[in-house]
Image: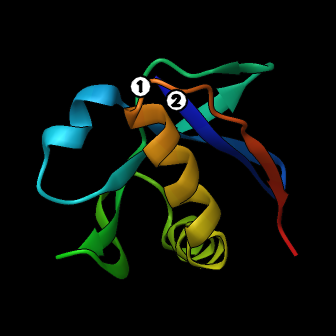
Amino acid sequence: MGQLALLYLFLRAYVLVSIPVDKYENRRHVHVFPRLKGARGKYSVAKIWLESHGQKQVEIYESSLSSKDNDLLLRIIDDNWEYINEQMTKSFNGEKTHPKEIKLK
């Protein structure tokens, strides 16, 4: 499992993760896990599409987060799309990923 980014939104923190078997799905996406006491939570709280037919298209597939957090996640993922995709490619190729700390601007 490749950790792609650590997101800090106000007092909450999330981890964007790519799961190796996901490379066989038809659209690139990330799973969003809460970061609890320095560790990744056990269950995904959102799944966000990154593209459609090879073109950038950031959208929520499913989420249990508030609309405010969803909007912030979409904005941050859109702003860091190239980096996230680069790390996802590394993860899918079995290479080490380097999570980027992203703080809300």
Looking at the rendered structure, which numbered label has been put on residue 43?
1
The residue under label 2 is 2
Q: Nearer the viewer, residue 43 or 6?
A: 6
- Residue 4 drawn at (x, y percent): 60, 42
Is there any visible trace of residue 82 in the rendered image? yes
Please tell me how many numbered marks the rendered image carries: 2
Residue occupying the point 62% across, 25% down:
96
- Residue 58 drawn at (x, y percent): 40, 76
Left or right: where does residue 97 sit relative to residue 104? left
- Tell me if mark 2 has few (under 14), some (14-19) or many (20+) residues whose alpha carbon lies within 10 angstroms of its own: many
- Tell me if mark 1 has few (under 14), some (14-19) or many (20+) residues whose alpha carbon lies within 10 angstroms of its own: few
- Residue 24 drawn at (x, y percent): 14, 40
Is there any visible trace of residue 32 in the rendered image? no
Residue occupying the point 83% across, 67% down:
104
Residue 84 to residue 90: above or below = below
Residue 45 to residue 64: above or below = above
Left or right: where does residue 29 sit relative to residue 73? left
Q: Mark 2 or mark 1, which is nearer the start of the sequence?
A: 2
| Amino acid type, residue under disc 1 in the picture | Tyr
Secondary element under disc 2, as helix, strand or loop, is strand
Q: How is the image coloured?
A: rainbow
| Amino acid type, residue under disc 2 in the picture | Gly
Cα separation between marks 1 and 2: 15 Å
